[in-house]
Image: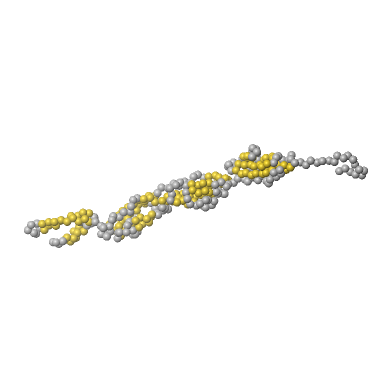
Amino acid sequence: MQIIAQTDSSVTVRFKSFGRYAIYGRNILSCVPTEDSVVIIAASSTPPVNLGLDLQICPGNIKTLHAGKVYTHYEWQDGSTDSLLTINQPGQYWVKVTDSCDNILSDTINVILAPPVPLNIGIDRIICENDTVHLTANPGFMNYQWSPSYQTSATTGQSIIVKPLVDTSYTIIGEMTPGCFGYDTIRITVHKTPAINLGNDKSFCANDSLIIDAGFGFSNYKWNTGANSQQLTVKSAGSYSVIATTNFGCKSYDTLAVPTIFALPQPTLDKNPVLCEGCRDY
């Protein structure tokens, strides 16, 4: 406390900081010395500046620090003078403010880099052409965004179904809290399976046979007759199908029908041995 001015009946003081102060006065000129005192509480009507608790910031995110709008002057560590400060990097931030009583107040906040947000959609996959894959991210996110949209059942949501026809990488972005994101990518490799063409349905004559061929490019063949060779010799009517499997487990199939086995014709000869003169027997 500092006395600025004083008379026999008044005193002017200045308080350099908030607190509780007692002022005493004594009249030494009266016949009986008298004295009295007064207690003054020096305080501002504005609250202390408070930037809040220390916080985390995610990479690429922004946050706004609020010093409050009840002060007459602001000064941040970067020299800005607004009541708000927008930040996008971790660090220590402080502000000095002046209240209506010309008191200078300050506060500091520590902003640290948030740890990576865990998001997982599984390991890379190998599939066969025309297979479908169910992709599911771990729960707990506000929203999910998938890309690209190629051969997908949806582009949002925790789970989607994809059916790529060529090698494709799918990426997911999940927002854990406002502005904080997790990322993951899965690559799906698509193995194409050779087509099988056993040909058109075909009938043939008795004692003949038909060779049907499932083609190259497979490691395993399974006919409905129980045979496991690439080719099958058919001698009777019926339906013949094959399932062929590649080294990667991809399957192709086809069916051929032999509707009819034609009976052989039975030739007959005229048994009359008599010939006319000048005629021939055909």
**At x 72% / y 43%, what residue is drawn?**
204
Whether residue 79 is visible: no
Whether residue 225 is visible: yes
Q: In the orientation shown, which residue stands out farthest toward the front?
A: 272
**At x 14% / y 61%, what residue is drawn?**
9
Q: Classify 30 as above or below 144.
A: below
**Where is the N terminus found, in terms of image quarters?**
bottom left
**At x 25% / y 57%, what residue is drawn?**
44
Q: In the orientation shown, which residue stands out farthest toward the left?
A: 31
Please identify the quarter of the rendering in which residue 50 is found: bottom left
Q: Residue 196: horizontal and vertical position, in percent?
A: 64, 45
**Where is the C terminus found, in terms of image quarters?**
top right
Please identify the quarter of the rendering in which residue 24 is found: bottom left
Q: Classify 196 as above or below 85.
A: above
Q: Residue 262: horizontal and vertical position, in percent?
A: 74, 42
- Looking at the image, how many numbered discs can be counted on the residues? 0
Q: In the orientation shown, which residue stands out farthest toward the top?
A: 226
Q: Residue 187: horizontal and vertical position, in percent?
A: 52, 47
Q: Is residue 65 left or right of residue 21?
A: right
Q: Residue 119: horizontal and vertical position, in percent?
A: 45, 47
In the image, 259 versus 214, the foreground residue is: 259
Q: What's the colour scheme?
A: secondary structure
**At x 12% / y 56%, what residue is drawn?**
35
In the image, 236 versus 83, the foreground residue is: 236
In the image, 143 versus 66, the foreground residue is: 143
